[in-house]
Every structure is written in C-alpha cells, then in structure tokens.
Amino acid sequence: MQPFIQFASVSKSFGSLTVIDSLNLTIHQGEFLSLLGPSGSGKTTILMMLAGFERPTQGTITLDGTRIDQLPPHRREMGVVFQNYALFPHMTVAENVAFPLEMKRLPRAEIAQKVDRALDMVRLGHLKHRRPSQLSGGQQQRVALTRALVFEPRVILMDEPLGALDKQLREHMQLEIRELHKRLGLTIVFVTHDQSEALTMSDRIAVFNAGRIEQIDSPHAVYDTPRTRFVAQFIGETNLIEAEVVNVQEEHATIALGDGLTARVRTGPELEPGQKAWFSLRPERMRLGANPAGGNVLDMVITDCIYHGDHMRVQLARGNFSFTARCERLAGNWTVGAPVVVSFDPRDCTVLAP
C-alpha cells in the first residue's frame, strides 16, 4: 500500500532536550492511527509537526508524496481538534463551523449549505444559533469536530479530544467518531494516553516511549502479543514476572517462575536456555479451579478478593511469588486463605527477552 503520510528519520529537539528521536512512521489513507503513550513520550509533538505548528529539527514529512514539513499550517489541508475545543466564544455554533470556509473565501450560499450539512451529520443542526457557553461538553466537542470536517480536509488530527468529558459521554463520543471515520473514509491521527480509548477506536496503535515507537500494530496484536516489557505493562494490566528459560523446543519453551513453579509458554526467536526473561500473563486469561488438558496448572493460595461489580479480582500467592486473576463475579465462591488450582494456556503467555 502506498504511504499517505510518511515521517522519514524525523527528530525534534528543544534546546538540548530531544523529544523525538529518528522517527520513521507510515500512515495509510483512510486509516485511524492512535499515538498512545504516557505524558512526555512525544506523541503530541508528532501531531504538532504534522499540523505545522512545530517543525522537525531533522528529517522530512510527506503527504501523498509531497513534502509538507516546510509548509505553513493553512496549506496542509488538515483539520485539528484539540482537547479544549478552541471554539470562539463570541460566535454561534454555525459561525464557528463556517470560520474555516470563510478563510477560504467561499461564496456565502455555499458556506451556509456546507455548514448545515455538516451540523446535520453530527445531529446539531437544531443548535446552530447557540453560543458555545450554552452547550454541554459533548456538544462543544461535536462542534469542534464538525469545524475540522467542514472544509473536507485530507487528514483529521485529534489531540486528546475527549479528555475533558465524563466517562459515559467519552465512551459515547468514541463510538460517534469511530462511526464517522468509517462512514466518511477519513484519515485520522489520534493522540491519547487512554489505552481503552486507543483499543476501542483504532485500526493501528503506535505505542510511544521516550520519543520512540516501542510497537506499532493492530489493537489485538498490541494487547495479546506485546513485543517489549514497556508495551506489556502500559497496555492494559498484566502479571509481569522475571523468569529463567529452562529449555526451548520448536513451538514452546519451559520457564522457571520461582518457588519451584514452571510454565510452558510460546517460544520466540530470542529465547535461549539459561536466559533471564520477562513472563507476561493477562489476569483475564487465568482460570481458577480448572485443570484443562495440555495447559499450565499451578497450586496457589488466595490472599485477597476484591469486588468490582461485574467481576472479581483475586490475589494469589505461593511463597514470594504472586499473581492477580480476573474472574466473573459468579464464577466461584472464593475464600481468602483457601488453596486453589490456577490454570492457563501456553498460547496466552508472552515471554519477552530482557
């Protein structure tokens, strides 16, 4: 597939501080790509360079084969949605949405038609004469999104656009943006530090750490097969334990977890006998009181049970070795201090070289 947006050896420094280090990144047309990472990992700086508000210290950025890193923001054909919405408080909803079209000096009749069509698309046509202060947070967010869409940009850039919304409204807006992306075939670059948001909305996720991409993959692959310890820890929750490789076969390896416990896991090309490695297992992949054929079986003791409404979190231990399991609320009557059999499939484990 022909690259639509391409970062080639892009670095960005502020004085002696390097924020982005030799970034190579390809974004495809019509793709929803999330840039995910902790604060200070460089994801917003990438968005600002793409929008034209920052320039790379080194490297080039191209859009559909044309270099854009030297162009001013208004010549890049990109719509930008910020966390604080950046709406003009003295303008009505319709006037806010019309602003980028007026900057392009389109005829008034065409502007009115485009504004009405865009507001109807996000179900805000009945509010077009209100000012931003008369709208809810979710409505303001939809106005900001509509203003970014109305001039039909080639790319939509979103910087933590849902961060100021409450949980229920944020989840609703996630689905609305996802539906608009699919219906209009938009290319969206979405910055977030919310793992759940990235997993819900994205075609691919680029996980950033200290200015570098740790992994770029589908949400399924990033969650189920993390390639680094950082990704395993940052995406969702996992039991991450330092282990030692005992032996390596064609498809599986045996590792020593500690306190006499061993487990069979999927092997990888980096694993060698005697090597230290990191063992990762998601809490929801564990089964309590089950003993499947061909799976790993560990004898442990329940040390705590924590109620979470739709599920229970069960803390397990054996000597200095501990696990956290996530279970359906009605899956069993677990008692603190009781022994329990813990099982999991070798395919559900990830072992990472140090």
Image: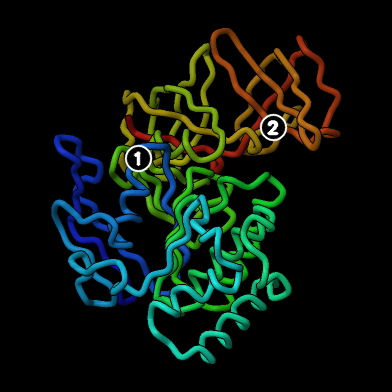
Q: Badge 1: how crowded within 10 Å, few (<14), some, or many (20+)?
A: many
The structure residue drawn at horizontal position 31% and vertical position 32%, both measured from the top left corner, is 272
Q: Is residue 320 left or right of residue 286?
A: left
Location of the C terminus by quadrant is top left
Element type at marker 1? loop
What label sits on residue 111 in the rendered view? none
On the image, the x and y values in percent for residue 109 come to 54, 92
The structure residue drawn at horizontal position 35% and vertical position 40%, both measured from the top left corner, is 41
Q: Nearer the viewer, mark 1 or mark 2?
A: 1
Residue 220 seen in this snapshot: no
What label sits on residue 326 in the rendered view? 2
When the figure is inspected, residue 261 is found, relative to residue 233, above or below; the finding is above
The structure residue drawn at horizontal position 74% and vertical position 19%, both measured from the top left corner, is 340
What label sits on residue 41 in the rendered view? 1
When the figure is inspected, residue 34 is found, relative to residue 274, above or below; the finding is below
Q: How are the colours assigned in the image?
A: rainbow
Of labels 1 and 2, earlier in sequence is 1
Q: Residue furthest front?
A: 90
On the image, the x and y values in percent for residue 314 come to 71, 23
When the figure is inspected, residue 236 is found, relative to residue 129, above or below; the finding is above
Tell me the kind of residue under disc 1. Ser
The structure residue drawn at horizontal position 56% and vertical position 34%, both measured from the top left corner, is 237
Q: Is residue 226 left or right of residue 349?
A: left
On the image, the x and y values in percent for residue 111 come to 52, 85
Tell me the kind of residue under disc 2. Arg
Q: Is residue 345 left or right of residue 242?
A: right
Element type at marker 2? strand
When the figure is inspected, residue 124 is found, relative to residue 197, above or below; the finding is below
Residue 175 seen in this snapshot: yes
Q: CA distance from mark 1 to mark 2?
A: 30 Å
